[in-house]
Amino acid sequence: MILIIIAALNFFIGLVILLRNYKSKVNWSFSLLLFSVVFWSISLAISREAAISPFAIFWSKSAYYSSAFIAFFLLWFSFAFPYKRKNINIITKLFIWTPSLIILAILLKGNLLIKGLEIRDWGYDVQFGHFWYWIYSIYILFFFIWAYYNIWKSYLISSGFNRLQLKFILIGLLLAGVFGIVFDLLLPYFGNWKLNWLGPYFSILVLFSTSYLIFYKPNKQN
């Protein structure tokens, strides 16, 4: 139930941010990031409740879809905020879109990433295709580190309130990223799916504080 509440709050904030300025790339990228967290939270919540039903594997796969979207839109956001940048060159676009399409193909294929479920007393563990799970994990880590690097570069050349914003974003991303990777990427791989519901818990405070800093404080950039 708490995961559903987290999803609803993220959806509300994402919608408000988008409606404030639907022409802004910053607003679009951050709203889509929040909507991806909505999808992630709902998928985890339903997969836990549907542990012994035929729908469990569908919602378990959905959680990995949404995590891929989170990584993608986080990277998009890192290129948009806080400064207007020149158009992204073709090489950078290839490094963004090629792995994203590969991951999408892996997920759509069916049982490459998730092969099945193993019933436990408390629910179930997911059985992964090890090779493709490593490919998926590298994609998530690569996009997260790239986004963090982009924001870090912006922080180094920023000043004033923009620097304060970026400082909080860097700290928040580090906390949310580390805990999300541990509970939703590493532990499930080693047979502990039981704690995957903790990932969205660590993201919610970070996303709310970041939303406030970016969109509800005076900022001439946006």
Image (spheres, rainbow, N blue to C red):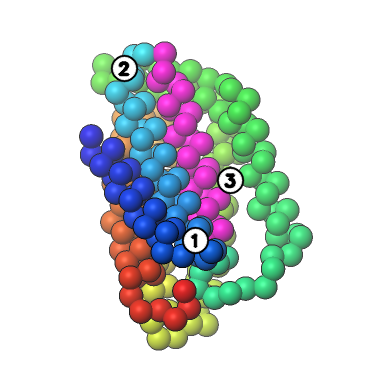
Task: Please state which of residues 185 and 166 is positioned toward the viewer in this rendering.
Answer: 166
Q: Position of residue 46 (x, y in %)?
A: 34, 27
Determine which of the numbered discs, if any, sits on residue 120 in the image: 2
Q: Residue furthest left?
A: 1
Q: Nearer the viewer, residue 89 or 138?
A: 89
**Above-or-below relation of 86 to 72:** below
What's the distance in space between the residues labelled 3 and 1, CA to CA?
29 Å
* Magenta extent: 54-78
Number of numbered markers: 3
Task: Classify the position of the N terminus by image quarter.
Answer: top left
- Judging by the rendered image, the residue that carries numbered circle 1 is 22
The answer to whether residue 112 shows anywhere in this view is yes
187 part of magenta stretch: no
What amino acid is found at the position of numbered circle 1 in the picture?
Answer: Tyr
The kind of secondary structure element at disc 2 is: loop
Cα–Cα gap, marks 3 and 2: 29 Å
Q: Which residue is mark 3?
A: 139
Q: Badge 2: how crowded within 10 Å, few (<14), some, or many (20+)?
A: few
